Image (cartoon, rainbow, N blue to C red):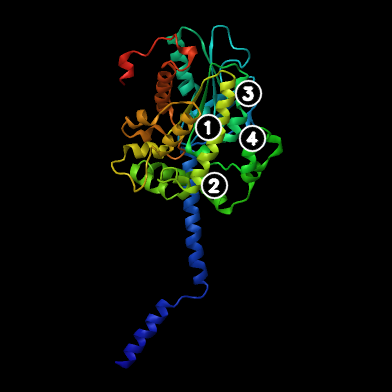
């Protein structure tokens, strides 16, 4: 009996004891299997979810901010969106008309801001500014010329430096689109103080290129098409998307009340910048309209049956509205029209977060409504929107 027990123990020992090399080879094989699976998944998703970036028309300028090459055309594709052609006129603006002297009898709109102003990832004919200009031209019986100075990543300090250029176009109104990401971009005190002397301060460029391993790793993961596709499907669930976004900390703190000191400082800096923009526009006799564009998470919160504790989707827009009122700047509220649309987060690209074509249609309708209210003299003679449209 004792011999049998010894044999069983010996047999068990033989079965459970692995050669030393296997402790190295088995994990390595597992790791290689995972890499092969991820590689195959990446190849497959890149074939199905095609994405093409182009910087052929970008001119990097650390002083005035990036801009686009005059008379340049490029095509790009977001994995979640369609192919889009970007054509820039002789001034490097995303406009189909010349930036030369304003045509006789025409009404001119100048637009500044970042990617939302430029209508990133949206075909030209679907953009809010092309839709609005066509509608306004029909109602006013006059050509409505749009000069779009928007550039992706253009921070408020760079948007301010673009105002003299916008005013030189002799516009009848300037539209300044802004979103939480714009204010999130760092502005150093010296840069703000020397906002009218940009050549004396180059701190923003240094902040842009400062090494950050965690940011580099995040960028690498974002570039993975497999991760993007997984996020695309996961984030279509509104509550999952909201919970995930709220984990971002400072990036999500524009939604939390009360505002953190970091966001209080960002609003304070924006107060200074918008005040300076308003002064220049007022001196030139040009009306200024600020348009805070809701982010995808704000739109999702508007449709959510229950908000997380201390979260207010209206907080950002309310603060910008108060700053605008302080400086006598006209304000276009987009939160209410977006809030009236069920599942408004579907108006955005799920992962990328920019507004899709259907969302631009909503912005265009509200912009036309705002410009026909009478605050912009150039549109005071135009036919108002029919009551049936106003009630939509």
- When asked about the image quadrant of residue 169, the answer is top right
Are the residues flagged by discs 1 and 3 in contact, CB closer than 8 Å? no
Distance from Cα at disc 4 to Cα at disc 3: 15 Å
Percent of width and height locating residue 54: 59, 33
- Total marks in image: 4
SS label for mark 3? helix
Residue drawn at 66 percent across, 45 percent down: 206
In the picture as drawn, the residue positioned furthest to the front comes out as 326
Please state which of residues 163 and 10 is positioned toward the viewer in this rendering. Answer: 163
**Residue for badge 2:** 219
Distance from Cα at disc 2 to Cα at disc 1: 19 Å
Residue drawn at 58 percent across, 53 percent down: 213
Image side of residue 100 versus residue 290, left or right: right
Please state which of residues 347 and 34 is positioned toward the viewer in this rendering. Answer: 347
Q: Which mark is residue 165?
A: 3
Image side of residue 217 versus residue 339, left or right: right
**Residue for badge 4:** 195
- When asked about the image quadrant of residue 276, the answer is top right
In the picture as drawn, the residue positioned furthest to the right comes out as 200
Where's the C terminus, which quadrant? top left
Count residues near mark 4 (Cα–Cα under 10 Å), then give few for <14, some for 14-19, many for 20+: some
Can residue 57 be seen at all in this image of the molecule?
Answer: no
Q: Earlier in the sequence, mark 1 or mark 3?
A: 1
Percent of width and height locating residue 212: 59, 51
**Residue for badge 1:** 115
């Amino acid at each position: 009996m004792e011999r049998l027990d010894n044999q069983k123990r010996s047999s068990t020992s033989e079965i459970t004891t692995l050669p030393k090399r296997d402790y190295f080879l088995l994990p390595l094989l597992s790791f290689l299997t995972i890499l092969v699976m991820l590689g195959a998944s990446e190849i497959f998703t890149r074939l199905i979810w095609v994405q093409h970036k182009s910087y052929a028309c970008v001119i990097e300028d650390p002083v005035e901010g990036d801009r686009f090459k005059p008379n340049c055309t490029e095509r790009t594709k977001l994995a979640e969106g369609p192919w889009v052609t970007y054509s820039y006129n002789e001034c490097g603006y995303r406009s189909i008309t010349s930036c030369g002297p304003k045509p006789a009898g025409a009404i001119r709109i100048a637009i500044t801001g970042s990617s939302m102003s430029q209508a990133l990832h949206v075909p030209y004919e679907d953009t809010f500014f092309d839709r609005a200009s066509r509608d306004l031209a029909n109602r006013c019986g006059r050509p409505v010329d749009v000069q779009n100075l928007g550039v992706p990543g253009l921070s408020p300090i760079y948007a301010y430096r673009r105002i003299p250029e916008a005013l030189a176009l002799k516009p009848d109104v300037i539209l300044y689109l802004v979103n939480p990401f714009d204010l999130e971009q760092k502005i150093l005190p010296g840069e703000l103080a020397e906002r009218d002397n940009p050549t004396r301060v180059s701190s923003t460029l240094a902040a842009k290129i400062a090494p950050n391993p965690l940011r580099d790793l995040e960028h690498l993961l974002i570039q993975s098409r497999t991760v993007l596709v997984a996020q695309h499907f996961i984030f279509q669930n509104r509550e999952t998307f909201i919970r995930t976004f709220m984990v971002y900390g400072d990036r999500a703190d524009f939604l939390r009340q009360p505002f953190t000191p970091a966001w209080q400082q960002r609003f304070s800096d924006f107060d200074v910048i918008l005040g300076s923009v308003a002064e220049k526009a007022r001196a030139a006799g040009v009306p200024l309209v600020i348009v805070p564009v809701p982010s995808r998470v704000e739109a999702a919160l508007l449709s959510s049956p229950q908000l997380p504790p201390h979260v207010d989707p209206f907080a950002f827009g309310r603060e910008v509205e108060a700053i605008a009122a302080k400086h006598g700047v006209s304000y276009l509220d987009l939160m209410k029209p977006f809030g009236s649309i069920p599942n408004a987060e579907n108006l955005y690209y799920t992962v990328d977060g920019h507004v899709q074509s259907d969302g631009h249609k909503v912005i265009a309708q509200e912009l036309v409504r705002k410009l026909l209210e009478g605050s912009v003299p150039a549109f005071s003679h135009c036919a108002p929107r029919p009551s049936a449209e106003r009630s939509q």
